[in-house]
Image (cartoon, grey):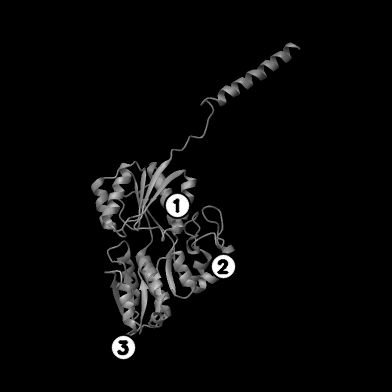
Amino acid sequence: MSNREKISWCAGVLLLVMLYLLSSTDLIIKEKKREICRISVIIDNVNDNYYGSFRAGMDMAEKKYQADVNFITLYAENDEEQQEELIVREIKDGANAIILAPVREDLAVMKLDEISPGCPVIFLGPTAINSSVACSISVDRYEMGRTLGEKIAESEDPAVPVCLFSEGMEYTGNLDAYDGIRSVLDPAGFTVRLIEKKSEDTYRKAIEETVYPESGDFMAVGMDVGALSELADILEGSSVYREHVTALYGIGSTTALLNQLDRGIVKGLMAWNRFDEGYLSVEKAVQAAGGEWKGKTDHIDTGVYRRGDLKEWDLRKDAISDGIGGGRYEKGKCSDPCHCGDGASRGKRLAVREKDRRA
């Protein structure tokens, strides 16, 4: 073996040894390991029936950002005190960020100001950004009410009274939606009555009154998803009630409500993109926890849907642009087609939604 060959062989061995040593140490430049962001999501209900698409978006963001998301429900519905206790508990347990769907916005903000959470809080709903609230992700409830009012005014007879059913005006966004719908129905000549839930049978009693002689028919509008769901179930269970409640509209959507829309129990509903809402909430929580982002309100797309929209949806599913995860809606893959939106560009509308807005 010549000297040149010996030198080449030694150099090769030395290079292999150096590569081995480098690969077993921190000398090789590696991608910085991302710290797991612990996020606690505290909702305003006893179950997640209204959060199917929200959780789908949240799960996708959790995987992308390598977060650890803990989804927490209440033990008693609309229990403000219990929600406050859960906020304090999760902060003490080391949550890096809180995503909160407040039972009551005003009380939640007061509690956060009182405890000074020490971690970013992402609000689901409209609120002022301050030292306690890093950002909010919301829909324009006034605009939703106004748009729904326009659809009702276009389609219905002003001679038929409208009953607005609500879980309570004190709950987040309900008063704004109420003001929005009345801003249209009052000038259009509709007689409007507000019915707030005071007991478990408030809605049923109001509907039962329509079957009495000379009581008169009315249109029903659920001002929130809880009211709309209960009204739809009551009407679906009685053909007699459906003869006297001439139409049911509302704000919010679940898989059950979409099925009831398809069966004609619900005539029209105002929905927002809950998939994007879930995705954005986790994305902003991770960014805020890392000190990268705060102090802004993101608004989610909304649209009015009627029975024909769902029929056309099945025929035009390929027209939907790619979502955050790059997939397309397929029947049976997404629990709520109204919420499988284009999260990548936020501002895009679904094909059906664009059609409805031009109508």
Q: Where is residue 239 in the image (x, y as percent from the top left)?
A: 42, 80
Please name the amino acid that badge 1 sits on.
Met
Residue under pointer 3 = 214
Q: Are marks 1 and 2 in contact (CB under 8 Å)?
A: no
The location of residue 320, given as percent across then percent down, is 55, 62
Q: Tell me, yes or no, whether the two marked residues, 1 and 3, touch with CB atoms within 8 Å.
A: no
Q: Which amino acid does label 3 sit on?
A: Glu
**Could you tell me how far apart the alpha carbons at marks 1 and 2 are, in whole angstroms?**
25 Å
Q: What residue type is labelled 2?
A: Asp
Q: Name the residue nearer the viewer: 285 or 220.
A: 220
Q: How crowded is mark 1: few (under 14 residues within 10 Å), some or many (20 or more)?
A: many
Q: Which element is circle 2 on?
A: helix
The first of marks 2 and 3 along the sequence is: 3
Residue identifier under label 1:
58
Report x, y in % for residue 53: 46, 58
Would residue 131 be seen by someone viewing this image from the given angle?
no
User: Which one is earlier in the sequence, the residue at label 1 or at label 3?
Assistant: 1
Which residue in the rendered view is the most extreme toward the bottom? 214
The residue positioned 28% from the left and 53% from the top of the image is 82
How far is disc 1 from disc 3 in space, using C-alphas? Answer: 50 Å
Quarter of the image for residue 250 reads bottom left
- The answer to whether residue 6 is left or right of residue 351 is right
> Mark 2 to mark 3: distance in Å?
43 Å
Res. 314 mark: 2
In the rendered structure, are the residues bearing label 2 and label 3 in contact, judged by CB atoms less than 8 Å apart?
Answer: no
Name the residue: 51% across, 74% down.
Answer: 308
Image spot of residue 121 (x, y percent): 34, 48
Q: Nearer the viewer, mark 2 or mark 3?
A: 3
- Residue that appears at 47% across and 68% down: 258
